[in-house]
Each structure stands twice: as structure tokens, then as C-alpha cells.
Image (cartoon, rainbow, N blue to C red):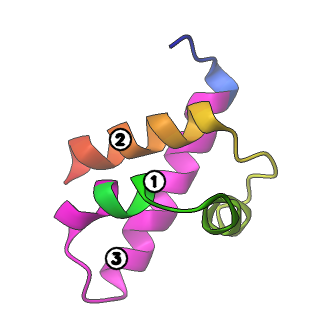
Amino acid sequence: METNRYQRRKAKAMAATFMLAACASDTPLANLPLLASRMTDNQWRCVAFQAGQAVPDHAAKVLTVALLAKLS
């Protein structure tokens, strides 16, 4: 999959949002990639907006899951 800088920047912001949420809860970091990959479109849109990203596209979701897998 070909991605651009904009999508990579969105993925980093969303991965950071997931990490902050996990740190504030009892969710293990190892569960984040699975949780992100199973999110519905509405859930994903909420995470994107929380991260300050207006366009939660599929490529950014795939990159976010990959980043979370590397970090966990």
C-alpha cells in the first residue's frame, strides 16, 4: 500500500492518542493493535477526531495498527 506523509502523520497522531488512553486505563499496550483493528467506522472516526484528525481514512488506520504493533 502506497502512503503519503499526510497519512503517516495522521497515523502517528492516532497512535499517540491510543497510547495516552491506554496509559490512563488498565488496557495493556499489547492489546492496542487488536483493539484498533476491530473498531467500527464510527469508533474509528471518534478516535481520529480525538487525535485532531478530520479525515480518518483506511490507509491511516492500517498505518496506526502497524505503529501500535511496533510500540507494543
Which amino acid is tagged 1? Ala
Residue highlighted by disc 3 = 22
| Tally of marks | 3
Q: Is residue 26 above or below residue 71?
A: below
Residue 37: x and y in percent read 41, 52
Seen from this angle, which residue lies furthest bottom? 25
The Cα atoms of the two marked residues, 3 and 1, are separated by 11 Å
Q: Please report whichever mark, 2 or 1, sits nearer to the chain's N-terminal start.
A: 1
Q: Residue at x 56, y 10 (%)?
A: 2
Q: Please report whichever mark, 2 or 3, sits nearer to the chain's N-terminal start.
A: 3
Residue highlighted by disc 1 = 15
Indicate the quadrant where residue 51 lies: bottom right
Specify whether 63 is left or right of 26. Answer: right
Q: Is residue 9 visible?
A: no
Which amino acid is tagged 3? Ala
Specify whether 64 is left or right of 27. Answer: right
Q: Residue at x 32, y 49 (%)?
A: 68
Q: Secondary structure at mark 2?
A: helix
The region drawn magenta spans: 7-33
The Cα atoms of the two marked residues, 2 and 1, are separated by 7 Å
Residue highlighted by disc 2 = 67
